[in-house]
Amino acid sequence: MSSFDKIHTVENNFAKSNPNYLKTMFGSTDIMPLWIADMDFEIAKPIQDALQQLVTRNIYAYEFNTEDVFKAISDWNFKRHQLKLNPKSFVQVSGVLTGIGVLIRELSEKGDNIMVQTPVYHQFYKVIESANRKVVSNKLKVVDSHYKMDFEDMERKLKTLNIKAILLCNPHNPVGRVWNEEELQKLVDLANQYNVTIISDEIHSDIVYSKSQFNSIASLDNSENHIAVIGSPAKTFGMQSISNGYLYIANENIFKQVKHTIGSLYLDHGSIHSANATIAAYTKGEEWLNDLVVYLEKTMNWIIDFIEKELPQVKLYKPEGTYQIWLDFSMLNLSDNALKHLVVHQAKLALTPGDWFEKNHIQFMRMNIASPLSKIQQAFYQLKEAIDTGIDPSFDKNTNANDCCSC
Ligand SMILES: Cc1ncc(COP(=O)(O)O)c(C=O)c1O
């Protein structure tokens, strides 16, 4: 039995299992929460020790340690991804989305267009639109059951729509693609040709499965004017509630400008808990991470096998990275409302609805698999039972999707 098999009694105040959130989002509290992208696993022992050490001191005077953090991130990326980063080119922010929010404001004006590859992590819409910029969707296309970037559509839009930045998700949440070097180089070359800055959100960079290889935007030729948001240990080490975000800005002028803005807003203060936990993670957490990736891959293989044998009506887009899986339920031929009813009220699962990632994806759902295998297996047994039983005869076809659950 591995430590990842341990079932923890999840506290109600974790966002994903908070009854108020579940009621608001899904219209039910009696559901297994597999929606928010965080982990059910205990953090690595070296991170526990680092946090414990701080807590036992009982003194919380101002304390900063960013230089050691930047060095730890650089060393990690060199060792893990053969990526050479200059520790002096990092800017710390309080979280990845905060960093992206600042970058969007620095690199564009109100009313400007920002491109994203959709379907995409739903907060990308918010971080763009709440800054009064407009989202331009460059839809991903499916080729042989595999999501690909549509470069023709991208170039047409770059040429005609006065796009100021591309907000890239690599590895991609929710479709699980880990963009390969060729795809990324094509993207960088197009961005350079049309004078557009890429902001590459690489928060999922360390959760990559055995047949794939992560490439940072910062590793590519002619990428010095683009920005990588790399080094947040949030997803890698399950530190969602305590981690900072790190911007890597190789271009000196943009670096100075962004650093000044972030400093003037005091967004670079961070907390020593986050700093020391990050250092512990990147200097002593590799063995734990290797075991985690093996565990997640084992879970994934179980799911692939189960779907193939027991649930062929559900299509899984096998991810190359991230601990999210992207499921297509359209073969069930259910109405959007009936599908939501079946998943939430019959299978009793809280999965992230596909229309959060792009409006027309209501027949898709994202499942977070960073949980003990036994829990994921239980989720699939419940799903199979609901699908085999069919939609509950008491379900009112005239129900509005939002009456069924407000997700
Ligand atoms: C692609 C991506 N970026 C950013 C975040 C959130 O990062 P943070 O909590 O550091 O703002 C998430 C969380 O799911 C994510 O998937």
Image: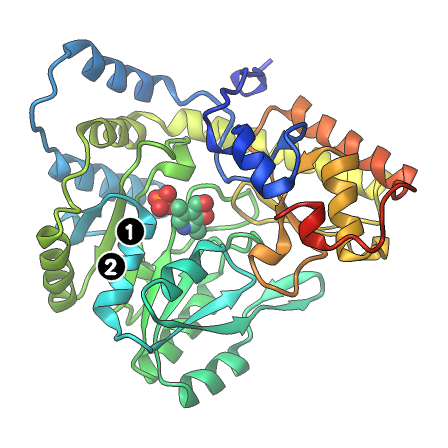
The numbered disc on residue 102 is 2
Q: Coloring scheme of the render?
A: rainbow
Q: Quadrant of residue 391?
A: top right
Q: Residue at x 34, y 51 (%)?
A: 97
Q: Give the residue at the far bottom of this rendering.
A: 160
Q: Is mark 1 within 8 Å of ligand 1?
A: yes
* Image location of residue 174, percent across then percent down: 56, 52
User: Taking 353 as reference, is 257 left or right?
Assistant: left
Q: Amino acid at mark 2?
A: Val
Badge 1 element: helix
Q: Amino acid at mark 1?
A: Thr
Q: Is residue 57 above or below residue 388?
A: above
Q: Residue at x 57, y 33 (%)?
A: 296
Badge 2 element: helix
Q: Is residue 3 above or below residue 220?
A: above
182 and 111: which is toward the camera: 111
Report the Cα–Cα distance between label 1 and label 2.
6 Å
Query: Is the residue under label 2 in contact with that under label 1 (CB below 8 Å)?
Result: yes
Few, some or many residues within 10 Å of mark 1 (<14, 14–19, 20+): some
Q: Give the residue at the far top of this rendering.
A: 56
Q: Which residue is mark 1?
A: 98
Q: Can you see residue 19? A: yes
The numbered disc on residue 270 is none
Q: Residue at x 52, y 29 (%)?
A: 18
Q: Quadrant of residue 379?
A: top right
308 and 314: which is toward the camera: 314
User: Taking 181 as reference, is 228 left or right?
Assistant: left
* Image location of residue 313, percent across then percent down: 84, 49
Q: Quadrant of residue 107?
A: bottom left
Q: Quadrant of the N terminus?
A: top right
